[in-house]
Image (spheres, rainbow, N blue to C red):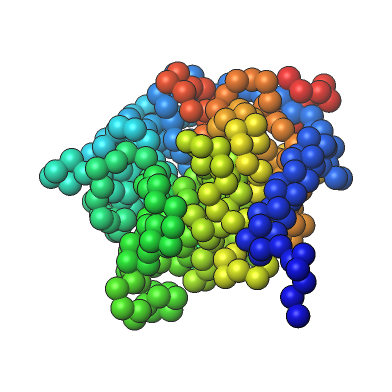
């Protein structure tokens, strides 16, 4: 027999979610357990980048490719700070949040000279969609050759937000994460819950752009066979765990509720039916917080509702270098709103609240990368006159 005092399940789940969010906020204000506030110094490698979005460091060569959202691809010599422009870049729709976005090197680079790019491209009616392509990098002529479009996250829409997108490689597959194009119909018919397209999803392709036979939705009627996971809001960071090989990502919530997720084959991550943010327009919760009884995969780390706790992540890298030995295995994630670089301790799939690097500098951190040869940490900020920064071990034992 049910008790007369039993509360509705939805109410209990909402209360539970708010309690967890308050606890997360309290933890967020405390130093992460076992993490020392590390000593580092900041060097300006180059200056004057125009709204950079992503970077890729050439192994051995040491030069750094940087995309600018307006549609320019730069190459920077960190020894001199010299900046040059490459030609052969695809035409982009540089409006709103669109433009030239992520860049990644073929996993066998430079033996395989492919460079992979994502960008917002438009159709003949001016509508836009996120594109994935690749081209051969000619460093002698500073140009991209033989550009191929591998995938388009169709359909095209007359809107200019939430394109995603980030690129990673694992086991000779390319994974790409997309955004939900900022649709606001917060119900089961939302685009991120629609398997017919990859907006609000991750995809998995072979390196030449074909669909693997073992993707989870191959053969499902009306499903895009490229989809690997879905139910995401706006994926702005991806990295592969150096030990497990799992693909990790970070995505924006709405007015808080930002998430770090470990990607699972065929997994539904709940957006917008489960989440921790609130409606920008009303400040009210629009989704039920994740619950162990629902069908959605909960994040391994999340932020609570409201702008005070709004992290909006961008750029992610696991630290694998030698320069900061005590950081090995930690996760670095950029922060656009509170303007710092988060350093997260990771134990399996347990993630501690971050130490805040570069806090107080005023930089909206757009991307972060670890130098494959020097182990230094490279950072770009989202600004019309942005520097390329490098974090090195401090020679004085303090922040500089």
Q: Please name whichever residue, 240 or 45, is drawn nearer the observer in this view of the structure.
A: 240
| Drawn side of residue 375 relative to residue 36, left or right | left
Q: Position of residue 133 (x, y in %)?
A: 31, 52
Q: Please name whichever residue, 91 or 31, is drawn nearer the observer in this view of the structure.
A: 31
Q: Please name whichever residue, 45 or 53, is drawn nearer the observer in this view of the structure.
A: 53
| Drawn side of residue 252 relative to residue 120, left or right | right
Q: Please name whichever residue, 192 or 328, is drawn nearer the observer in this view of the structure.
A: 192
Task: Identify the residue at horizontal 45%, vertical 67% (top origin).
Answer: 228
Task: Identify the residue at horizontal 60%, vertical 33% (top origin).
Answer: 307
Question: Image height check: is 70 above or below 24?
Answer: above
Task: Identify the residue at horizontal 82%, vertical 37% (top origin).
Answer: 30
Which quadrant of the figure contains the C terminus? top right
Question: Image height check: is 39 above or below 328?
Answer: above
Q: Position of residue 389 (x, y in %)?
A: 58, 27
Q: Residue furthest left?
A: 124
Q: Position of residue 270 (x, y in %)?
A: 53, 60
């Amino acid at each position: 027999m049910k008790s007369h005092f039993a509360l509705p399940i939805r109410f209990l789940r909402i209360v539970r979610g708010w309690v967890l969010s308050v606890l997360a906020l309290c933890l967020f204000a405390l130093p992460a357990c076992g993490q020392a506030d590390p000593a580092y110094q900041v060097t300006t490698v180059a200056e004057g980048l125009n709204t950079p979005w992503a970077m890729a460091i050439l192994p051995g060569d040491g030069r750094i490719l940087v995309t600018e959202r307006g549609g320019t691809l730069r190459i920077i010599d960190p020894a001199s700070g010299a900046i040059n422009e490459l030609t052969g870049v695809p035409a982009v729709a540089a409006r709103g949040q669109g433009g030239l976005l992520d860049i990644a090197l073929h996993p066998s680079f430079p033996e395989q000279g492919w460079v992979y790019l994502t960008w917002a491209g438009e159709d003949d009616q001016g509508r836009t969609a996120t594109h994935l392509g690749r081209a051969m990098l000619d460093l002698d002529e500073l140009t991209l050759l033989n550009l191929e479009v591998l995938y388009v996250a169709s359909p095209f829409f007359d809107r200019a937000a939430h394109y995603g997108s980030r690129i990673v490689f694992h086991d000779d597959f390319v994974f790409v994460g997309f955004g939900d194009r900022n649709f606001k119909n917060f119900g089961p018919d939302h685009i991120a819950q629609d398997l017919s397209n990859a907006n609000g999803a991750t995809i998995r392709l072979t390196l030449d752009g074909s669909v693997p036979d073992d993707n989870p939705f191959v053969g499902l009627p009306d499903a895009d066979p490229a989809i690997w996971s879905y139910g995401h809001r706006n994926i702005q960071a991806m990295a592969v765990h150096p030990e497990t090989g799992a693909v990790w990502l970070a995505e924006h919530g709405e007015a808080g509720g930002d998430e770090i997720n470990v990607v699972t084959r065929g997994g539904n991550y709940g957006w917008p039916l489960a989440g921790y943010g609130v409606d920008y327009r009303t400040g009210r919760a629009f989704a039920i917080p994740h619950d162990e009884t629902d069908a959605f995969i909960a994040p391994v780390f999340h932020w609570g509702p409201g702008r005070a706790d709004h992290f909006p992540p961008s750029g992610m890298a696991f630290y694998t270098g030698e320069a900061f030995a005590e950081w090995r295995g930690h996760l670095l994630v950029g922060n656009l709103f509170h303007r710092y670089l988060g350093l997260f301790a990771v134990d399996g799939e347990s993630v501690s609240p971050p130490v805040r690097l570069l806090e107080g500098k005023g930089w909206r951190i757009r991307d972060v990368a670890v130098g494959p040869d020097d182990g230094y940490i490279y950072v770009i900020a989202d600004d019309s006159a942005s520097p390329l920064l490098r974090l090195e071990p401090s020679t004085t034992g303090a922040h500089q």
